[in-house]
Image (cartoon, grey):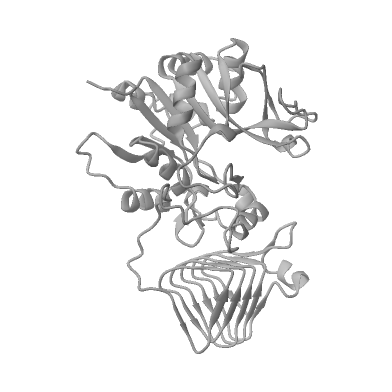
């Protein structure tokens, strides 16, 4: 007999991530490498597993091969106690069509809910960087008696125009859920900030099933969780907000408490990496009490030879810095930087090779990119724009397997 409520985790990992192109040219957004040793999906899965939830379905759709492979290699479990973490591809169970929205993805996968018969369903997104104990949110949901609880993070009202925004009463009941409003509502206790939706939800299982059926029968619906399902519960008075500030993760510091980044653009993806590299980082990867589980590379330790140095940087396993200078950068595993090269403020993914006397500044290099001897990137942005993607913030991004001279 269960002593705790039966909770099923559903991770929505089907996003194309068009704004992260070329990093999403041949992989789903949740599979994009991050932080030198992880992929974006590792953050939500680590949060769920650390919180005690180990029955997790990851719904995939676009370019999912590398994501499926990563989950099977990194997140396998014995299943001895009924635990599983499994990718679930779009299967066209309800006819010859793919998912038409995030709500439709769950509706077409309703067999997962019927098989598990959970009391509550945790539905989280797969492409944010943060730490969170979902069990605390589930407890708050159960105590409220709500049909759905939406995780809200406090953001300045001026920044909230880019998010789904939550207006709630003093009891945390949501009175309005508005997508990207021109005039975001303030919170009850602070008119200068707004609750922005984090895209994380806890549902009472029966209520979600019935709402998904109703939504599926509505020809005018976009079948989206944030755009259709949540507003429908709000209209019924059955939706509550959970303040992310109330979530306490073991081992967190005051500096990284409440950290959450939506890395949906190249600039935000780059900025989140820069949050990792200082001595006292805004987001601390070294919290042993709430670890982020990533790939096991089976590579030797990083090595510095011929006077090579790396300052204020993250350096992955198997990386060799041979007489080169690295500053303020994140280097993944199996990177090689040759003599005289300079790398500043950059993100280098696995397998990158930097030639002798090359210069790389403010750049993101995808897997297996090679900079030839004497090559330059991020030095002449006008020249770079003719060859590569340059973000509004001036970050040069090079797709997989390219050669830069």
192 lies above or below 203 = below
Residue 54 in sight here? yes
Residue furthest bottom as drawn: 306
| Quadrant in the rendering for residue 172 | top right
In the rendered view, does 173 fall on the left or right side of 87?
Answer: right
Q: How many numbered callouts?
A: 0
Tell me which residue sits at (45%, 33%) in the image: 134
In the rendered view, does 328 fall on the left or right side of 331?
Answer: right
On-image quarter of the C terminus: bottom right
The one of 275 and 405 positioned closer to us in this rendering: 275
The one of 167 and 107 positioned closer to us in this rendering: 167
Residue 81 spot, x, y in % from top left: 22, 35
Tell me which residue sits at (51%, 69%) in the image: 401
Residue 336 spot, x, y in % from top left: 48, 78
269 lies above or below 50 = below
On-image quarter of the N terminus: top left
The one of 289 and 265 positioned closer to us in this rendering: 289
């Amino acid at each position: 007999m269960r002593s705790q409520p039966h909770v099923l985790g559903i991770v929505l990992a089907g996003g194309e991530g068009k704004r992260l192109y070329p990093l999403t040219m041949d992989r789903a957004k949740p599979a994009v490498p991050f932080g030198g040793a992880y992929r974006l999906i590792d953050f939500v899965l680590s949060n769920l597993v650390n919180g005690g939830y180990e029955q997790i379905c990851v719904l995939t759709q676009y370019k999912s091969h590398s994501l499926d492979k990563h989950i099977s290699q990194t997140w396998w479990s014995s299943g001895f106690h009924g635990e599983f973490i499994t990718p679930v591809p779009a299967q066209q169970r309800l006819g010859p069509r793919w998912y038409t929205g995030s709500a439709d993805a769950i509706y077409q996968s309703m067999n997962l809910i019927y098989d598990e018969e959970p009391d509550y369903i945790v539905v989280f997104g797969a492409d944010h960087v943060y730490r969170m104990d979902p069990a605390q949110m589930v407890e708050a949901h159960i105590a409220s008696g709500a049909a759905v609880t939406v995780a809200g993070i406090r953001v300045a009202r001026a920044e909230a125009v880019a998010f789904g925004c939550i207006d709630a009463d003093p009891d945390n009941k949501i009175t309005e859920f508005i997508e990207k409003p021109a005039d975001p509502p303030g919170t009850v206790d602070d008119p200068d900030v707004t609750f922005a939706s984090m895209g994380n939800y806890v549902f009472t299982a029966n209520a979600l099933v019935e709402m998904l059926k109703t939504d599926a029968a509505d020809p005018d619906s976009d079948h989206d969780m944030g755009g259709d399902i949540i507003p429908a519960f709000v209209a019924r008075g059955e939706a509550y907000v959970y303040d992310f500030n109330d979530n306490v993760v073991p081992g967190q510091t005051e500096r990284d408490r409440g950290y959450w980044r939506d890395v949906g653009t190249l600039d935000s993806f780059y900025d989140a990496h820069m949050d990792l590299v200082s001595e006292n980082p805004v987001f601390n990867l070294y919290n042993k009490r709430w670890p982020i589980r990533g790939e096991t590379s089976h590579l030797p330790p990083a090595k510095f030879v011929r006077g090579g140095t790396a300052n204020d940087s993250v350096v992955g396993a198997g990386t060799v810095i041979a007489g080169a200078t690295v500053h303020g950068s994140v280097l993944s595993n199996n990177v090689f930087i040759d003599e005289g090269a300079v790398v500043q403020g950059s993100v280098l993914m696995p397998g990158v090779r930097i030639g002798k006397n090359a210069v790389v500044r403010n750049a993101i290099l995808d897997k297996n990119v090679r900079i030839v001897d004497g090559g330059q990137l991020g030095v002449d942005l006008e020249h770079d724009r003719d060859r590569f993607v340059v973000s509004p913030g001036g970050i040069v991004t090079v797709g997989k397997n390219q050669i830069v001279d």
